């Protein structure tokens, strides 16, 4: 069945595009006293409906800046210096602030870096979930009180928490529970797209795995697309359908996960993958255990960059070329195809 045929009842099939997210030539720069930092420079990619994309790259390569800009949550001195971002066909850089506010959470939701610290310490969990729903829903769509209470319980259960958590304050919760609450908030309006920026960093290994499994289940149940930002290649291998690799503000490779692990094209990706222990890419059942090697791989990224500095494809900025369907690489070696 094609994606268009899967369109929900009442939706114009012609408008039910296969791509949920289309990013074209996105540029996000920081204007600082010391000059301009091109944190995201000419990045383009597409994400299909229900697809899971991993975004990796060393610290400072621009991953968070890009994720935040996709929701227009980038903070000054960051500016969007160019490009387009289309979410389900809507050009979000052209929306008014009010339209953008409603688009957030409802259509595109963020599980921010350090999400567990994003909860407000003086409000009960229930109020924080309801606040999110109210703030991002137009008045006409608002549910009645009883329905909202039910929805809170439903959401808590969907992230593996008991209904009693609704009446607790953040300080009464463990790190993993707080992260689950952040997931409940992010999925409260069943967005088409979830951005998760290192959702498991700062959690212990067992809790990391549980959180990833929860994200996994939510994604499948909602058929949402996910952009998962992180350092952990093992986790990416288990979770992602496609992988984007960032290097100094550029997306240097973008490809289906199995292909990128078997046959990385860009020198940076090659070094990155060759430096890893044997990693199995998840099969289609998506039930493989999650690896938890974040700390190990963080070191690898920095080391790999050091070894690559003289390489032509990382020293000069070649454009991203599609060398096969959905296989993109920015490297002079592949400019004429493979
Ligand atoms: N507020 C800021 N002002 C100036 N430059 C900034 C600011 N925030 C980030 N940058 C710069 O933008 C670039 C990209 O940073 P960003 O945080 O997006 O990278 P990242 O890949 O997400 O890193 P990490 O993995 O550590 O989160 C870096 O060079 C960084 O120094």
Image: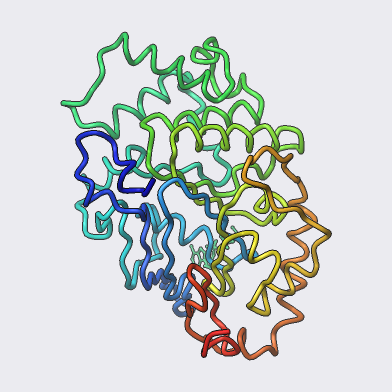
Q: Which residue is painted at 19% across and 52% down in the image?
A: 96
Q: Which quarter of the image is occupied by the N terminus?
A: top left
The quarter of the picture where residue 106 lies is top left
Q: Residue at x 62, y 45 (%)?
A: 284
Q: Residue at x 74, y 74 (%)?
A: 271
Evaluate whether residue 250 shows in this view: no
The answer to whether residue 126 is left or right of residue 147 is right
Give the quadrant of residue 199. Answer: top right
284 sits to left or right of 27? right
Q: How many marks?
A: 0
Nearer-the-camera pick, 105 or 337: 337
Among all residues in the image, which is located at the extreme right?
277
- The answer to whether residue 146 is visible is yes
Q: Residue 95, image x and y in percent? A: 21, 54
Q: Quadrant of ligand 1?
A: bottom right
Task: Return the residue nearer the eye: 66 or 227.
Answer: 227
As drawn, which residue projects farthest toward the left?
A: 140
**Residue displayed at 63% across by 34% down:** 213
Is residue 201 shown above or below 164? below
Where's residue 311, x and y in %? 68, 88
* Residue 181 to residue 336: above or below: above
Q: Quadrant of the C terminus?
A: bottom right
Viewer-proximal residue among 236 and 165 = 236
Residue 176, placed above or below residue 262: above
């Amino acid at each position: 069945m094609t994606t268009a045929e899967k369109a929900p009842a009442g939706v114009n099939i012609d408008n039910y595009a296969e791509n949920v997210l289309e990013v074209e030539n996105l540029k996000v720069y920081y204007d600082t006293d010391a000059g301009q930092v091109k944190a995201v420079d000419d990045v383009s990619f597409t994400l299909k409906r229900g697809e899971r994309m991993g975004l990796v790259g060393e610290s400072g390569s621009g991953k968070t800046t890009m994720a935040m800009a996709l929701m227009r949550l980038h903070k000054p001195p960051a500016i969007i210096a160019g490009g387009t971002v289309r979410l389900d066909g809507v050009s979000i850089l052209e929306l008014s602030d009010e339209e953008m506010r409603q688009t957030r959470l409802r259509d595109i939701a963020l599980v921010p870096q350090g999400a567990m610290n994003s909860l407000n310490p003086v409000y009960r969990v229930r109020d924080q979930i309801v606040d999110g729903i109210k703030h991002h829903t137009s008045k006409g769509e608002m549910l009645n009180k009883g329905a909202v209470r039910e929805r809170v319980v439903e959401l808590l259960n969907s992230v593996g928490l008991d209904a009693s958590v609704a009446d607790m304050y953040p300080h009464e919760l463990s790190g993993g529970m707080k992260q689950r609450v952040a997931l409940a908030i992010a999925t409260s309006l069943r967005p088409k797209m979830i951005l998760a920026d290192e959702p498991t960093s700062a959690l212990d290994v067992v809790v990391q795995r549980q959180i990833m499994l929860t994200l996994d289940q939510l994604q499948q149940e909602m058929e949402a697309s996910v952009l998962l930002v992180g350092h952990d290649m093992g986790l990416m291998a288990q979770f992602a359908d496609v992988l984007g690799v960032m290097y100094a503000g550029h997306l240097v490779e973008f490809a289906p996960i199995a292909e990128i692990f078997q046959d990385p094209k860009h020198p940076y990706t090659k070094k990155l993958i060759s430096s890893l222990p044997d990693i199995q890419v998840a099969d289609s059942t998506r039930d493989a255990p999650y690896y938890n090697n974040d700390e190990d791989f963080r070191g690898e990224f920095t080391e790999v960059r050091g070894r690559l500095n003289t390489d032509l494809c990382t020293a000069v900025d070649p454009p991203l070329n599609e060398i096969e369907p959905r296989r993109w690489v920015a490297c002079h070696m592949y400019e004429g195809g493979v």
